[in-house]
Amino acid sequence: MTSVAQQKWDFLKLSDTDISNLDAQWTFKDHYYYNQGINVGRYSKKGEDYSPYFTNRDSAALYSSIVLANGVELEMTKGLKFGFAHEGNQRFQANKSKAFRIYKEKKGYGIFPEMAGAFFIIPNVVKGDTIIVISRPGGDEGRGLSSEELTVISGFQPTTEPSNVINKGVSKVDGNVLISTGGKTSILLSVEVKKPTTGIAAIQTSGVKHPERIYNLNGQFVGTDFNKLPQGVYIKQGKKFIKK
């Protein structure tokens, strides 16, 4: 499995190159930029159910696209793929759908999912990698992010809290990780892929006097009885365990 080349994407910062390409794409009256890279789709046929494609990470990757501005992939989102699934019509939307947008007059605003079916793909993830997506609720409808490929540690659920949300989970798969958005109330601020920290294993292997100790992924001692711990990912004696 090839590791994802880029480890972190900051949607609050635009490089000079990105700004130049976005400005070339924008017109004077535009207040925000729509992703025009979503130009492939799969339409439903009468009597055939395509709904599994909307939760299947590999199919979603086929029907999603990189973000282009002025014909060039944005450095801010380089490597990530974005798409839009219209479940009501059981299809992946095509024809340059306006699923995501970047504001021209709101610098540092992040990426705004315009539609509830908007999703994005993180490619080349390795099982055991920790995915962290920082989002900000933009309304009071209680929408949020979700992913079937992650063992959730925090976030990844509907919320109406006004503060930024740390959506954190450990990948259960190799390859593509599909992140679905609730649309309009989940403004994307950043994405990060973290590899398992070797230092945690060192804590365990050196702790011969306390082999029963259990730690979280931050290296913090959380207890000795696995059955009493909430769902999550833990380290014991240098090995990773997932409690579902």
Image (cartoon, rainbow, N blue to C red):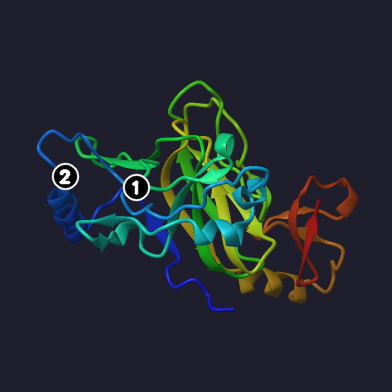
In this view, 157 is above or below 177: above
List x then y, in percent, for residue 207. Answer: 78, 71
Density class for disc 1 (Cα within 10 Å; few <14, some 14-19, many ≥20) is: some
- Percent across and percent down for residue 139 are 45, 24
Residue 5 pos. (x, y %): 44, 73
Q: What kind of residue is marked 2?
A: Trp
Which residue is rendered at x = 59% and y = 42% of the image?
90
Taking depth in this image into account, of 160 and 174 the one nearest to the observer is 174
Circle 1 residue: 96
Q: Residue at x 32, y 57 (%)?
A: 76
For the residue pair 62 and 149, the one nearer the viewer reads as 62
Q: Quadrant of residue 1?
A: bottom right
Q: Residue furthest bottom?
A: 1
Furthest-front residue in this view? 46
Looking at this rendering, what residue extends furthest in the top direction?
A: 140
Q: Dividing the picture into quarters, in which one does residue 70 lie?
A: bottom left
The residue shown at (63%, 44%) is: 154
When asked about the image quadrant of residue 210, the answer is bottom right
Q: Is residue 128 left or right of residue 33?
A: right
Q: Residues within 10 Å of mark 2 (few under 14, many from 20)?
A: some
Q: Is residue 232 left or right of residue 44?
A: right
Tell me the SS state at disc 1.
loop
Residue 113, above or below 73 = above
Point out the frontmost of discs 1 and 2. 1
Under mark 1, the amino acid is Lys
Which of the two labelled residues, at mark 1 and mark 2, occupies the earlier sequence position?
A: 2
Q: Nearer the viewer, residue 45 or 160?
A: 45
From the image, tell me which residue sits under label 2.
Answer: 26
Q: Is residue 225 visible?
A: no
Asked whether residue 10 appears in the rendered view, the answer is yes
State whether residue 20 is above or below residue 123: above
